[in-house]
Amino acid sequence: MNLFFASLLLTLVQGGFVRRHTPGTYDISIIHTNDIHSHYDQNNKYGTDCTPAQITSKQCYGGVPRLKAIIDQLRREHPNSLLLVAGDQFQGTLFYSYYKGNITADIMNLLKYDAMAIGNHEFDDGPENVARVAEKFNFPIISANIDASKNA
């Protein structure tokens, strides 16, 4: 049986069905975010909402507009790039508590993520909510060894 599969593989390779490796290099850039926890507004150095005075004096950080500007700049500078997220987009602010992931999906689609791994906080409202929000994503979720049973 092993001889059969070895012969089949050799036939496919020689027949051009399997692409041959071409020596050379391929540059790829990974743009990565994680643990945003629904913090979509800008924050001050204490991680709380910016006051008008802090905004005027440019003492605020983060927020979706800044994140999008940086991602867009990195994509222009590195055209062969992937935007990946390692999870924990859910939970953390009223954006999630009220909208239960709908705003999260809208923002992640706006930023044009290429793929997402699921974090522990994605399951805070159960696997049903993860599945519901995932239907709104324009990109795949890539994860393994997830046990979403009630006893896990």
Image (cartoon, helix red, strand yellow):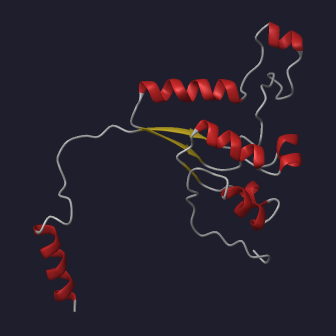
Residue drawn at point x = 59 percent, y = 70 percent: 145
Residue 131 in the image: above or below residue 114 = below
Work out which residue is located at the far top of the displayed protein and give it. 57
Q: Position of residue 149 (x, y in %)?
A: 74, 76
Q: Disc count in the image? A: 0
- In the displayed structure, does residue 103 sit left or right of residue 20? right
Q: Position of residue 85 (x, y in %)?
A: 60, 46
- The answer to which image quadrant residue 28 occupies is top left
Residue 106 in the image: above or below residue 14 = above
Q: Give the position of the C terminus as an image quadrant.
A: bottom right
- In the displayed structure, does residue 39 sit left or right of residue 142? right
Work out which residue is located at the far left of the displayed protein and give it. 14
- In the displayed structure, does residue 123 sit left or right of residue 24? right
Residue 150 in the image: above or below residue 45 = below
Work out which residue is located at the far bottom of the displayed protein and give it. 1
Q: Position of residue 8 (x, y in %)?
A: 17, 80
Q: Give the position of the N terminus as an image quadrant.
A: bottom left
Residue drawn at point x = 10 percent, y = 68 percent: 14
- The answer to which image quadrant residue 124 occupies is bottom right
Residue drawn at point x = 80 percent, y = 25 percent: 43
Nearer the observer, 46 or 15? 15
